[in-house]
Amino acid sequence: MAFNVMEHDMVPEHHLLSEKEADGVLAELRVGREQLPKIKSGDPAIRFLEEVVGEPIAEGRVIKVVRLSATAGVFVAYRVVVER
Amino acid sequence: MARKDTIDALRRRKVGAKTAALLVDAGYTMASLKKAKLKDLEKVVTQEDAIRALKRLGIKVEVPPPKKAPSKKKAPVKKKTPAKKAPKKPAAKKALKKAAKKPAKKAARKKPKVRPTIPSKVPEPSAWEKRVMRILQSKKRELPSSLIQNLAARAQKLKLKKPDLEKVVDYLWDQYGANLVDPNESVGIVSAQSIGEPGTQMTMRTFHYAGVAEMNVTLGLPRLIEIVDARRVPSTPVMEVFVSDGADDLDRMRKHATEIEMTHLEDIADTEADFLNNRVVVYPNVAKMRSRGVTWKDLDHTLSKMRREKVKRVEGDKKRKMEAYVLDLDQVSYKRLQKQLETVKTSKIKGIDGVHRAIIRRRGDEYVIYTEGSNLAAALELPYVDPTRTNSNNITEIYEVLGVEAARNAIVREATSTLAEQGLTVDIRHIMLVSDMMTNAGDVKAIGRHGISGRKSSVLARAAFEITSHHLLKAAVTGEVDYLDGVAENVIVGQPVTLGTGAVNLVYRTSAKEG
Protein backbone atom coordinates (compact mmCIF):
# COMPACT_ATOMS: atom_id res chain seq x y z
CA MET A 1 0.00 0.00 0.00
CA ALA A 2 1.23 3.43 -0.88
CA PHE A 3 -0.30 5.11 2.14
CA ASN A 4 0.33 4.56 5.80
CA VAL A 5 -2.80 3.48 7.63
CA MET A 6 -1.55 4.81 10.96
CA GLU A 7 -1.27 8.33 9.62
CA HIS A 8 -4.94 8.59 8.88
CA ASP A 9 -6.88 10.88 11.20
CA MET A 10 -9.40 8.18 12.01
CA VAL A 11 -6.84 5.65 13.17
CA PRO A 12 -5.59 6.01 16.74
CA GLU A 13 -2.12 4.96 17.81
CA HIS A 14 -1.62 1.22 18.07
CA HIS A 15 1.24 -0.32 20.02
CA LEU A 16 2.16 -3.95 20.39
CA LEU A 17 2.72 -4.86 24.03
CA SER A 18 5.36 -7.35 25.03
CA GLU A 19 4.11 -10.44 26.85
CA LYS A 20 5.36 -9.01 30.12
CA GLU A 21 3.65 -5.66 29.61
CA ALA A 22 0.48 -7.47 28.57
CA ASP A 23 0.45 -9.56 31.73
CA GLY A 24 0.99 -6.42 33.78
CA VAL A 25 -1.93 -4.68 32.08
CA LEU A 26 -4.22 -7.67 32.54
CA ALA A 27 -3.30 -7.91 36.21
CA GLU A 28 -3.95 -4.22 36.69
CA LEU A 29 -7.31 -4.37 34.96
CA ARG A 30 -8.11 -7.69 36.65
CA VAL A 31 -9.41 -9.26 33.47
CA GLY A 32 -8.51 -12.25 31.36
CA ARG A 33 -7.39 -12.02 27.77
CA GLU A 34 -10.71 -13.33 26.50
CA GLN A 35 -12.49 -10.46 28.22
CA LEU A 36 -10.65 -7.78 26.29
CA PRO A 37 -12.14 -6.39 23.08
CA LYS A 38 -10.75 -8.14 20.04
CA ILE A 39 -8.87 -7.11 16.96
CA LYS A 40 -8.56 -9.42 13.98
CA SER A 41 -5.11 -10.50 12.90
CA GLY A 42 -5.95 -9.35 9.39
CA ASP A 43 -6.82 -5.84 10.53
CA PRO A 44 -4.93 -3.18 8.57
CA ALA A 45 -3.53 -1.77 11.82
CA ILE A 46 -2.18 -5.18 12.82
CA ARG A 47 -0.70 -5.75 9.39
CA PHE A 48 1.04 -2.44 9.74
CA LEU A 49 2.37 -3.29 13.21
CA GLU A 50 3.70 -6.55 11.80
CA GLU A 51 5.69 -4.49 9.34
CA VAL A 52 7.08 -2.41 12.18
CA VAL A 53 7.96 -5.39 14.34
CA GLY A 54 9.21 -7.37 11.37
CA GLU A 55 7.47 -10.59 12.32
CA PRO A 56 3.92 -11.91 12.35
CA ILE A 57 1.89 -11.02 15.41
CA ALA A 58 0.53 -14.13 17.07
CA GLU A 59 -2.95 -14.62 18.35
CA GLY A 60 -3.37 -13.62 21.98
CA ARG A 61 -0.96 -10.70 21.85
CA VAL A 62 -2.29 -7.54 23.43
CA ILE A 63 -2.45 -4.29 21.47
CA LYS A 64 -2.49 -0.97 23.24
CA VAL A 65 -4.66 1.61 21.54
CA VAL A 66 -4.18 5.24 22.52
CA ARG A 67 -7.44 6.89 21.57
CA LEU A 68 -8.12 10.57 21.45
CA SER A 69 -11.50 10.62 23.11
CA ALA A 70 -13.93 13.48 23.05
CA THR A 71 -14.79 12.93 26.69
CA ALA A 72 -11.69 11.54 28.36
CA GLY A 73 -8.99 13.26 26.34
CA VAL A 74 -6.27 10.68 25.86
CA PHE A 75 -7.63 7.26 26.66
CA VAL A 76 -5.75 4.00 26.60
CA ALA A 77 -7.68 0.93 25.51
CA TYR A 78 -6.52 -2.61 24.91
CA ARG A 79 -7.45 -5.18 22.32
CA VAL A 80 -6.39 -8.78 22.05
CA VAL A 81 -5.43 -10.19 18.67
CA VAL A 82 -7.70 -12.96 17.43
CA GLU A 83 -7.64 -15.07 14.33
CA ARG A 84 -9.20 -13.49 11.33
CA MET B 1 12.01 -16.25 49.05
CA ALA B 2 13.95 -13.03 49.59
CA ARG B 3 16.15 -13.99 46.70
CA LYS B 4 13.19 -14.39 44.38
CA ASP B 5 11.66 -11.11 45.49
CA THR B 6 14.85 -9.24 44.83
CA ILE B 7 15.21 -10.79 41.42
CA ASP B 8 11.62 -9.90 40.65
CA ALA B 9 12.20 -6.37 41.80
CA LEU B 10 15.24 -6.11 39.54
CA ARG B 11 13.37 -7.66 36.64
CA ARG B 12 10.63 -5.12 37.08
CA ARG B 13 13.24 -2.42 36.67
CA LYS B 14 14.20 -4.12 33.41
CA VAL B 15 17.47 -5.54 34.60
CA GLY B 16 18.28 -8.68 32.64
CA ALA B 17 17.32 -12.00 34.28
CA LYS B 18 20.84 -13.35 34.20
CA THR B 19 22.40 -10.21 35.64
CA ALA B 20 19.78 -10.05 38.34
CA ALA B 21 20.36 -13.64 39.40
CA LEU B 22 24.13 -13.19 39.49
CA LEU B 23 23.90 -10.01 41.55
CA VAL B 24 21.47 -11.48 44.05
CA ASP B 25 23.52 -14.63 44.41
CA ALA B 26 26.51 -12.47 45.25
CA GLY B 27 24.55 -11.21 48.24
CA TYR B 28 23.22 -7.93 46.94
CA THR B 29 19.81 -6.65 48.00
CA MET B 30 17.90 -3.74 46.55
CA ALA B 31 19.19 -1.43 49.28
CA SER B 32 22.80 -2.46 49.00
CA LEU B 33 22.70 -2.32 45.22
CA LYS B 34 21.70 1.29 45.33
CA LYS B 35 24.79 2.12 47.30
CA ALA B 36 27.03 -0.26 45.40
CA LYS B 37 29.91 0.99 43.30
CA LEU B 38 30.49 -0.03 39.76
CA LYS B 39 33.81 -1.53 40.72
CA ASP B 40 32.22 -3.93 43.18
CA LEU B 41 29.62 -5.07 40.73
CA GLU B 42 32.19 -5.70 38.05
CA LYS B 43 33.53 -8.53 40.15
CA VAL B 44 30.22 -10.37 39.79
CA VAL B 45 29.02 -9.51 36.32
CA THR B 46 30.56 -8.06 33.19
CA GLN B 47 31.19 -4.36 33.18
CA GLU B 48 28.63 -3.75 30.48
CA ASP B 49 25.90 -5.56 32.41
CA ALA B 50 26.80 -3.77 35.62
CA ILE B 51 26.53 -0.38 33.96
CA ARG B 52 23.22 -1.26 32.44
CA ALA B 53 21.87 -2.59 35.74
CA LEU B 54 22.93 0.51 37.65
CA LYS B 55 21.42 2.74 35.03
CA ARG B 56 18.13 0.92 35.25
CA LEU B 57 18.18 1.39 39.00
CA GLY B 58 18.47 5.09 38.41
CA ILE B 59 22.02 5.45 39.65
CA LYS B 60 24.34 7.75 37.79
CA VAL B 61 27.34 5.89 36.55
CA GLU B 62 30.50 7.47 35.38
CA VAL B 63 31.09 5.58 32.24
CA PRO B 64 34.65 4.41 31.87
CA PRO B 65 36.24 4.86 28.43
CA PRO B 66 36.08 1.24 27.22
CA LYS B 67 32.28 1.45 27.21
CA LYS B 68 32.45 3.15 23.83
CA ALA B 69 32.34 -0.09 21.93
CA PRO B 70 28.71 -0.92 22.68
CA SER B 71 27.56 2.67 22.41
CA LYS B 72 28.86 2.83 18.88
CA LYS B 73 26.44 0.16 17.82
CA LYS B 74 23.42 2.07 18.98
CA ALA B 75 24.51 5.50 17.91
CA PRO B 76 24.18 5.10 14.14
CA VAL B 77 20.59 3.94 14.45
CA LYS B 78 19.56 6.86 16.57
CA LYS B 79 21.43 9.38 14.49
CA LYS B 80 20.05 8.16 11.25
CA THR B 81 16.40 8.31 12.14
CA PRO B 82 15.87 12.03 12.53
CA ALA B 83 17.77 12.73 9.34
CA LYS B 84 15.73 10.26 7.34
CA LYS B 85 12.44 11.36 8.80
CA ALA B 86 12.36 14.33 6.50
CA PRO B 87 11.83 12.51 3.18
CA LYS B 88 8.65 10.61 2.35
CA LYS B 89 7.60 8.07 4.89
CA PRO B 90 7.97 4.77 3.00
CA ALA B 91 11.58 5.57 2.20
CA ALA B 92 12.30 6.38 5.81
CA LYS B 93 10.74 3.12 6.88
CA LYS B 94 12.88 1.11 4.53
CA ALA B 95 16.00 2.91 5.64
CA LEU B 96 15.08 2.28 9.23
CA LYS B 97 14.60 -1.38 8.60
CA LYS B 98 18.00 -1.63 7.03
CA ALA B 99 19.65 0.35 9.77
CA ALA B 100 17.90 -1.56 12.48
CA LYS B 101 18.56 -5.00 11.13
CA LYS B 102 22.30 -4.66 11.08
CA PRO B 103 23.14 -4.04 14.74
CA ALA B 104 21.46 -7.22 15.93
CA LYS B 105 18.13 -7.85 17.61
CA LYS B 106 18.32 -5.23 20.34
CA ALA B 107 18.06 -2.41 17.88
CA ALA B 108 15.38 -4.16 15.91
CA ARG B 109 13.23 -4.50 18.99
CA LYS B 110 13.72 -0.87 19.80
CA LYS B 111 12.33 0.13 16.46
CA PRO B 112 8.72 0.59 17.60
CA LYS B 113 9.96 3.44 19.74
CA VAL B 114 11.59 5.30 16.89
CA ARG B 115 8.61 4.44 14.68
CA PRO B 116 8.45 7.13 12.04
CA THR B 117 4.84 6.28 11.56
CA ILE B 118 2.82 7.12 14.63
CA PRO B 119 3.79 10.74 14.90
CA SER B 120 2.32 12.87 17.64
CA LYS B 121 -1.34 12.07 17.72
CA VAL B 122 -1.22 12.45 21.48
CA PRO B 123 -0.36 16.03 22.36
CA GLU B 124 2.54 16.63 24.71
CA PRO B 125 1.28 17.82 28.13
CA SER B 126 1.91 21.49 28.84
CA ALA B 127 3.86 22.75 31.84
CA TRP B 128 0.69 23.36 33.81
CA GLU B 129 -0.72 19.99 32.92
CA LYS B 130 2.49 18.43 34.14
CA ARG B 131 2.12 20.35 37.38
CA VAL B 132 -1.37 18.97 37.91
CA MET B 133 -0.16 15.50 37.02
CA ARG B 134 2.62 15.73 39.57
CA ILE B 135 0.16 16.62 42.30
CA LEU B 136 -2.05 13.72 41.31
CA GLN B 137 0.91 11.41 41.26
CA SER B 138 2.00 12.40 44.74
CA LYS B 139 -1.47 11.43 45.92
CA LYS B 140 -1.47 8.27 43.81
CA ARG B 141 -4.52 9.34 41.93
CA GLU B 142 -5.45 9.33 38.28
CA LEU B 143 -7.83 11.58 36.40
CA PRO B 144 -8.81 11.55 32.73
CA SER B 145 -6.51 13.73 30.69
CA SER B 146 -9.36 15.93 29.49
CA LEU B 147 -10.01 16.97 33.08
CA ILE B 148 -6.34 17.63 33.62
CA GLN B 149 -6.19 19.75 30.48
CA ASN B 150 -9.26 21.69 31.50
CA LEU B 151 -8.01 22.29 35.00
CA ALA B 152 -4.54 23.24 33.82
CA ALA B 153 -5.92 25.78 31.35
CA ARG B 154 -7.99 27.45 34.04
CA ALA B 155 -5.27 27.29 36.67
CA GLN B 156 -2.89 28.92 34.25
CA LYS B 157 -5.31 31.78 33.69
CA LEU B 158 -5.66 32.35 37.42
CA LYS B 159 -1.98 31.64 38.09
CA LEU B 160 -2.84 29.42 41.04
CA LYS B 161 -0.21 28.81 43.68
CA LYS B 162 0.66 25.26 44.51
CA PRO B 163 -1.36 24.90 47.75
CA ASP B 164 -4.41 26.37 46.03
CA LEU B 165 -3.95 24.13 43.04
CA GLU B 166 -3.72 21.17 45.35
CA LYS B 167 -7.00 22.13 46.95
CA VAL B 168 -8.65 22.39 43.56
CA VAL B 169 -7.25 19.03 42.53
CA ASP B 170 -8.66 17.50 45.71
CA TYR B 171 -12.05 19.03 45.01
CA LEU B 172 -11.92 17.88 41.41
CA TRP B 173 -11.06 14.39 42.55
CA ASP B 174 -14.06 14.32 44.87
CA GLN B 175 -16.40 15.62 42.20
CA TYR B 176 -15.01 13.19 39.66
CA GLY B 177 -15.62 10.26 41.98
CA ALA B 178 -19.11 11.46 42.80
CA ASN B 179 -20.05 11.75 39.14
CA LEU B 180 -18.69 8.46 37.88
CA VAL B 181 -21.17 5.87 36.71
CA ASP B 182 -22.07 3.63 39.63
CA PRO B 183 -21.13 -0.02 39.49
CA ASN B 184 -23.98 -2.09 38.06
CA GLU B 185 -25.65 0.91 36.55
CA SER B 186 -27.49 -0.20 33.42
CA VAL B 187 -25.63 2.01 31.00
CA GLY B 188 -26.81 0.07 27.97
CA ILE B 189 -30.46 0.66 28.72
CA VAL B 190 -29.80 4.33 29.43
CA SER B 191 -27.98 4.58 26.11
CA ALA B 192 -30.78 2.88 24.24
CA GLN B 193 -33.32 5.28 25.73
CA SER B 194 -31.13 8.30 25.17
CA ILE B 195 -30.69 7.55 21.48
CA GLY B 196 -34.17 6.19 20.99
CA GLU B 197 -36.11 9.13 22.35
CA PRO B 198 -34.56 11.80 20.09
CA GLY B 199 -34.88 9.24 17.29
CA THR B 200 -38.66 9.59 17.50
CA GLN B 201 -38.32 13.25 16.62
CA MET B 202 -36.24 12.62 13.54
CA THR B 203 -37.68 13.19 10.15
CA MET B 204 -38.37 10.05 8.28
CA ARG B 205 -36.69 11.12 5.10
CA THR B 206 -34.46 14.03 4.34
CA PHE B 207 -32.18 14.32 1.41
CA HIS B 208 -29.64 17.01 1.38
CA TYR B 209 -26.20 17.59 2.56
CA ALA B 210 -24.97 20.54 4.57
CA GLY B 211 -22.97 22.65 2.16
CA VAL B 212 -23.36 20.54 -0.93
CA ALA B 213 -26.88 21.22 -2.08
CA GLU B 214 -26.61 19.47 -5.43
CA MET B 215 -25.81 16.14 -3.81
CA ASN B 216 -28.27 13.72 -2.34
CA VAL B 217 -27.30 12.12 0.90
CA THR B 218 -29.45 9.99 3.16
CA LEU B 219 -29.92 11.68 6.49
CA GLY B 220 -32.18 11.47 9.48
CA LEU B 221 -33.68 8.27 10.74
CA PRO B 222 -32.92 6.12 7.68
CA ARG B 223 -29.26 7.02 7.98
CA LEU B 224 -29.20 6.28 11.72
CA ILE B 225 -30.76 2.87 11.09
CA GLU B 226 -28.21 2.27 8.37
CA ILE B 227 -25.32 2.98 10.73
CA VAL B 228 -26.66 0.81 13.52
CA ASP B 229 -27.46 -2.01 11.10
CA ALA B 230 -23.88 -1.97 9.81
CA ARG B 231 -25.02 -2.16 6.19
CA ARG B 232 -22.28 -3.13 3.83
CA VAL B 233 -22.98 -0.24 1.51
CA PRO B 234 -24.97 2.79 2.64
CA SER B 235 -27.74 3.93 0.33
CA THR B 236 -25.76 7.04 -0.55
CA PRO B 237 -22.04 6.46 -0.15
CA VAL B 238 -20.07 9.70 -0.13
CA MET B 239 -16.39 10.43 0.05
CA GLU B 240 -14.63 13.60 1.08
CA VAL B 241 -11.40 13.73 -0.84
CA PHE B 242 -8.75 16.12 0.41
CA VAL B 243 -5.80 17.01 -1.74
CA SER B 244 -2.34 17.20 -0.25
CA ASP B 245 -1.26 20.28 -2.14
CA GLY B 246 -2.74 22.90 -4.35
CA ALA B 247 -6.04 22.62 -2.53
CA ASP B 248 -6.78 26.31 -3.09
CA ASP B 249 -6.18 26.12 -6.82
CA LEU B 250 -9.59 25.65 -8.43
CA ASP B 251 -8.24 24.64 -11.85
CA ARG B 252 -6.06 21.92 -10.44
CA MET B 253 -8.87 20.69 -8.25
CA ARG B 254 -11.13 20.49 -11.30
CA LYS B 255 -8.54 18.34 -12.99
CA HIS B 256 -8.29 16.07 -9.97
CA ALA B 257 -12.05 15.82 -9.80
CA THR B 258 -12.27 14.68 -13.42
CA GLU B 259 -9.60 12.11 -12.72
CA ILE B 260 -11.51 10.73 -9.76
CA GLU B 261 -14.91 10.76 -11.38
CA MET B 262 -15.62 7.60 -13.28
CA THR B 263 -16.24 8.33 -16.95
CA HIS B 264 -17.97 5.88 -19.26
CA LEU B 265 -17.76 6.05 -22.98
CA GLU B 266 -21.39 7.08 -23.30
CA ASP B 267 -20.70 10.17 -21.20
CA ILE B 268 -18.37 11.61 -23.82
CA ALA B 269 -19.46 10.07 -27.10
CA ASP B 270 -22.48 9.20 -29.18
CA THR B 271 -22.64 5.55 -29.92
CA GLU B 272 -24.73 3.91 -32.54
CA ALA B 273 -25.28 0.47 -33.90
CA ASP B 274 -24.93 0.45 -37.66
CA PHE B 275 -27.17 -2.43 -38.64
CA LEU B 276 -26.57 -1.99 -42.34
CA ASN B 277 -22.85 -2.59 -42.09
CA ASN B 278 -23.02 -4.74 -39.01
CA ARG B 279 -20.85 -2.56 -36.82
CA VAL B 280 -20.78 -0.21 -33.83
CA VAL B 281 -19.70 3.36 -34.44
CA VAL B 282 -18.54 5.73 -31.73
CA TYR B 283 -18.57 9.47 -32.37
CA PRO B 284 -16.63 11.21 -29.61
CA ASN B 285 -17.94 14.60 -28.53
CA VAL B 286 -14.93 16.87 -28.28
CA ALA B 287 -16.60 19.40 -26.00
CA LYS B 288 -17.71 16.73 -23.56
CA MET B 289 -14.30 15.14 -23.69
CA ARG B 290 -12.67 18.39 -22.74
CA SER B 291 -15.00 19.01 -19.81
CA ARG B 292 -14.35 15.52 -18.50
CA GLY B 293 -10.63 15.76 -19.12
CA VAL B 294 -10.52 12.80 -21.50
CA THR B 295 -7.81 12.73 -24.15
CA TRP B 296 -7.80 10.92 -27.48
CA LYS B 297 -5.12 8.73 -26.04
CA ASP B 298 -7.46 7.52 -23.30
CA LEU B 299 -10.04 6.68 -25.92
CA ASP B 300 -7.55 4.87 -28.11
CA HIS B 301 -6.45 2.88 -25.14
CA THR B 302 -9.89 1.69 -24.10
CA LEU B 303 -11.26 1.02 -27.54
CA SER B 304 -8.24 -0.74 -28.97
CA LYS B 305 -8.50 -3.16 -26.07
CA MET B 306 -11.72 -4.43 -27.60
CA ARG B 307 -10.41 -4.91 -31.10
CA ARG B 308 -7.01 -5.84 -32.28
CA GLU B 309 -6.99 -3.85 -35.51
CA LYS B 310 -6.87 -0.10 -35.71
CA VAL B 311 -10.29 1.29 -35.00
CA LYS B 312 -9.85 5.00 -35.42
CA ARG B 313 -10.87 6.38 -38.75
CA VAL B 314 -12.72 9.22 -40.37
CA GLU B 315 -16.37 8.57 -40.95
CA GLY B 316 -19.09 10.34 -42.79
CA ASP B 317 -19.63 11.95 -46.11
CA LYS B 318 -18.27 15.20 -47.46
CA LYS B 319 -20.84 17.26 -45.60
CA ARG B 320 -20.36 15.87 -42.15
CA LYS B 321 -16.95 14.44 -41.58
CA MET B 322 -15.69 13.51 -38.16
CA GLU B 323 -13.33 11.25 -36.35
CA ALA B 324 -14.95 8.08 -35.17
CA TYR B 325 -14.17 4.69 -33.84
CA VAL B 326 -15.60 1.78 -35.73
CA LEU B 327 -15.93 -1.69 -34.35
CA ASP B 328 -16.76 -4.25 -37.01
CA LEU B 329 -18.46 -7.46 -36.06
CA ASP B 330 -17.20 -10.60 -37.73
CA GLN B 331 -20.57 -12.30 -37.46
CA VAL B 332 -23.90 -11.08 -38.70
CA SER B 333 -26.05 -11.21 -35.62
CA TYR B 334 -28.50 -8.65 -34.37
CA LYS B 335 -28.18 -9.89 -30.83
CA ARG B 336 -24.39 -9.73 -30.79
CA LEU B 337 -24.51 -6.24 -32.21
CA GLN B 338 -26.79 -5.05 -29.41
CA LYS B 339 -24.52 -6.65 -26.87
CA GLN B 340 -21.43 -5.05 -28.37
CA LEU B 341 -23.14 -1.68 -28.27
CA GLU B 342 -23.86 -2.08 -24.57
CA THR B 343 -20.29 -3.06 -23.68
CA VAL B 344 -18.94 -0.14 -25.67
CA LYS B 345 -21.31 2.32 -24.02
CA THR B 346 -20.53 1.21 -20.47
CA SER B 347 -16.79 0.74 -20.87
CA LYS B 348 -14.85 2.73 -18.34
CA ILE B 349 -12.45 5.29 -19.69
CA LYS B 350 -10.99 6.74 -16.53
CA GLY B 351 -11.69 7.42 -12.87
CA ILE B 352 -12.16 5.37 -9.73
CA ASP B 353 -14.57 2.47 -9.77
CA GLY B 354 -17.76 3.30 -7.90
CA VAL B 355 -17.39 7.08 -8.02
CA HIS B 356 -20.24 8.36 -10.14
CA ARG B 357 -19.84 12.06 -9.56
CA ALA B 358 -17.27 14.40 -8.14
CA ILE B 359 -18.16 17.87 -6.94
CA ILE B 360 -15.78 20.55 -5.75
CA ARG B 361 -16.76 22.58 -2.73
CA ARG B 362 -14.94 25.25 -0.85
CA ARG B 363 -14.39 24.47 2.78
CA GLY B 364 -12.52 27.03 4.82
CA ASP B 365 -9.50 28.10 2.81
CA GLU B 366 -9.34 25.05 0.60
CA TYR B 367 -11.37 23.08 -1.89
CA VAL B 368 -12.59 19.60 -1.13
CA ILE B 369 -13.85 17.05 -3.61
CA TYR B 370 -17.09 15.39 -2.61
CA THR B 371 -17.92 12.25 -4.47
CA GLU B 372 -21.10 10.35 -4.99
CA GLY B 373 -20.12 6.74 -4.57
CA SER B 374 -17.21 5.66 -2.46
CA ASN B 375 -14.03 3.70 -2.97
CA LEU B 376 -11.71 4.63 -0.17
CA ALA B 377 -9.02 2.08 -0.93
CA ALA B 378 -8.54 3.39 -4.45
CA ALA B 379 -8.82 7.05 -3.47
CA LEU B 380 -6.15 6.78 -0.79
CA GLU B 381 -3.73 5.27 -3.29
CA LEU B 382 -3.89 8.29 -5.58
CA PRO B 383 -0.68 10.31 -5.45
CA TYR B 384 -2.27 13.74 -5.10
CA VAL B 385 -4.78 12.74 -2.43
CA ASP B 386 -4.10 13.53 1.21
CA PRO B 387 -4.32 10.05 2.73
CA THR B 388 -4.61 11.33 6.28
CA ARG B 389 -7.89 13.21 5.91
CA THR B 390 -9.71 11.67 2.99
CA ASN B 391 -12.81 10.05 4.33
CA SER B 392 -15.89 8.08 3.51
CA ASN B 393 -19.27 7.63 5.12
CA ASN B 394 -19.18 3.91 4.39
CA ILE B 395 -18.32 2.34 7.73
CA THR B 396 -17.68 -1.15 6.38
CA GLU B 397 -15.25 0.30 3.89
CA ILE B 398 -13.44 2.19 6.62
CA TYR B 399 -13.24 -1.02 8.59
CA GLU B 400 -11.70 -2.86 5.67
CA VAL B 401 -9.24 -0.17 4.69
CA LEU B 402 -8.30 1.40 8.04
CA GLY B 403 -9.23 -1.17 10.68
CA VAL B 404 -11.62 -1.60 13.61
CA GLU B 405 -10.46 1.35 15.62
CA ALA B 406 -11.08 3.65 12.68
CA ALA B 407 -14.48 2.02 12.20
CA ARG B 408 -15.26 2.68 15.84
CA ASN B 409 -14.46 6.34 15.35
CA ALA B 410 -16.44 6.40 12.13
CA ILE B 411 -19.57 5.04 13.80
CA VAL B 412 -19.34 7.68 16.51
CA ARG B 413 -18.75 10.43 13.98
CA GLU B 414 -21.50 9.39 11.58
CA ALA B 415 -24.09 8.84 14.31
CA THR B 416 -23.37 12.13 16.09
CA SER B 417 -23.36 14.11 12.87
CA THR B 418 -26.64 12.52 11.77
CA LEU B 419 -28.26 13.40 15.09
CA ALA B 420 -26.69 16.85 15.24
CA GLU B 421 -27.83 17.63 11.71
CA GLN B 422 -31.39 17.15 12.91
CA GLY B 423 -30.81 19.50 15.81
CA LEU B 424 -30.77 16.70 18.35
CA THR B 425 -28.13 16.46 21.00
CA VAL B 426 -27.31 13.06 22.38
CA ASP B 427 -24.43 12.70 24.79
CA ILE B 428 -21.51 11.28 22.86
CA ARG B 429 -20.94 8.69 25.62
CA HIS B 430 -24.10 6.85 24.63
CA ILE B 431 -23.01 6.68 21.02
CA MET B 432 -19.53 5.65 22.07
CA LEU B 433 -21.01 2.77 24.03
CA VAL B 434 -22.97 1.61 20.99
CA SER B 435 -19.87 1.93 18.85
CA ASP B 436 -17.79 0.01 21.38
CA MET B 437 -20.30 -2.80 21.40
CA MET B 438 -20.48 -2.95 17.63
CA THR B 439 -16.72 -3.19 17.24
CA ASN B 440 -16.04 -5.31 20.32
CA ALA B 441 -15.54 -8.56 18.42
CA GLY B 442 -12.91 -7.09 16.11
CA ASP B 443 -15.22 -6.38 13.22
CA VAL B 444 -18.30 -4.25 12.72
CA LYS B 445 -21.37 -6.08 13.96
CA ALA B 446 -24.91 -4.85 13.51
CA ILE B 447 -27.20 -4.32 16.44
CA GLY B 448 -29.90 -6.86 15.87
CA ARG B 449 -30.66 -10.45 15.09
CA HIS B 450 -27.53 -11.06 13.07
CA GLY B 451 -25.26 -8.96 15.20
CA ILE B 452 -24.98 -8.29 18.89
CA SER B 453 -28.42 -9.37 20.08
CA GLY B 454 -28.12 -12.65 18.23
CA ARG B 455 -24.81 -13.45 19.87
CA LYS B 456 -25.82 -13.11 23.49
CA SER B 457 -24.72 -16.03 25.56
CA SER B 458 -28.08 -16.52 27.22
CA VAL B 459 -30.69 -18.60 25.40
CA LEU B 460 -33.60 -16.94 27.14
CA ALA B 461 -32.33 -13.46 26.29
CA ARG B 462 -32.00 -14.43 22.64
CA ALA B 463 -35.40 -16.08 22.64
CA ALA B 464 -36.94 -12.99 24.18
CA PHE B 465 -35.56 -10.86 21.36
CA GLU B 466 -36.51 -12.47 18.06
CA ILE B 467 -37.24 -15.84 16.46
CA THR B 468 -38.11 -17.37 19.84
CA SER B 469 -38.92 -20.90 18.78
CA HIS B 470 -35.77 -21.23 16.72
CA HIS B 471 -33.51 -20.37 19.66
CA LEU B 472 -35.37 -22.52 22.17
CA LEU B 473 -35.41 -25.52 19.85
CA LYS B 474 -31.71 -25.21 19.07
CA ALA B 475 -30.84 -24.79 22.73
CA ALA B 476 -32.88 -27.86 23.64
CA VAL B 477 -31.19 -29.95 20.96
CA THR B 478 -27.66 -28.90 21.89
CA GLY B 479 -28.31 -28.89 25.65
CA GLU B 480 -27.42 -25.25 26.30
CA VAL B 481 -27.22 -23.97 29.86
CA ASP B 482 -28.49 -20.55 30.89
CA TYR B 483 -26.68 -19.06 33.85
CA LEU B 484 -29.25 -16.29 34.36
CA ASP B 485 -26.62 -13.56 34.43
CA GLY B 486 -28.44 -11.03 32.28
CA VAL B 487 -31.51 -8.89 32.63
CA ALA B 488 -33.97 -10.47 30.20
CA GLU B 489 -33.55 -14.01 31.45
CA ASN B 490 -34.09 -12.97 35.06
CA VAL B 491 -37.25 -11.11 34.12
CA ILE B 492 -38.51 -14.24 32.39
CA VAL B 493 -37.71 -16.39 35.38
CA GLY B 494 -39.16 -13.88 37.83
CA GLN B 495 -36.04 -13.03 39.76
CA PRO B 496 -34.64 -9.62 40.57
CA VAL B 497 -32.43 -8.49 37.70
CA THR B 498 -28.69 -8.30 38.18
CA LEU B 499 -28.56 -4.52 38.03
CA GLY B 500 -28.16 -1.81 40.63
CA THR B 501 -29.22 -3.12 44.02
CA GLY B 502 -30.22 -6.41 42.44
CA ALA B 503 -26.59 -7.13 41.71
CA VAL B 504 -25.62 -7.17 45.37
CA ASN B 505 -25.96 -10.31 47.41
CA LEU B 506 -26.03 -10.61 51.16
CA VAL B 507 -23.46 -12.94 52.57
CA TYR B 508 -23.58 -13.96 56.20
CA ARG B 509 -20.18 -14.09 57.76
CA THR B 510 -19.77 -15.20 61.37
CA SER B 511 -17.60 -12.85 63.39
CA ALA B 512 -14.05 -13.79 64.14
CA LYS B 513 -14.70 -14.02 67.87
CA GLU B 514 -17.38 -16.66 67.59
CA GLY B 515 -15.08 -18.57 65.28
Image (tube, coloured by chain):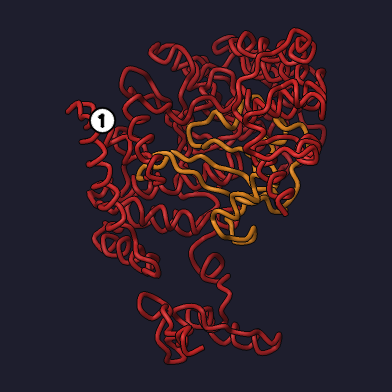
Chain colours: A orange, B red
Report whether residue B338 is seen.
no
Please tell me which residue lies in front, B406 or B239: B406
Q: Position of residue B138 (x, y in %)?
A: 39, 40
Type of the residue with mark 1: Ala
From this viewpoint, is residue A19 visible? yes
Q: Which residue is drawn at 47% across and 13% down?
A: B245
Horizontal and vertical percent for residue B393? 46, 42
| Position of residue A2 in the picture relative to residue B180 (left or right) | right
Quadrant position of residue B7: top right
Which of the chains bears the disc numbered 1?
B
From this view, report whether residue B323 is shown above or below residue B406: above
At horizontal 70% and vertical 23% (from top left) the residue drawn is B303
Is residue B513 shown above or below B78? below
Task: Judge from the rendering whether residue B424 lies leftward or rightward of residue B280; answer left or right.
Answer: left
Location of mark 1 (residue): B153
SS at badge 1: helix
B119 with respect to B8 (left or right): left
| Quarter of the view holding residue A43 | top right
Q: Which residue lies furthest to the bottom in this view?
A: B494
- Left or right of B389: which side holds B330? right
Q: Residue at x 59, y 55 (%)?
A: A27
Judge by depth and name the residue closer to the eye, B180 or B352: B180
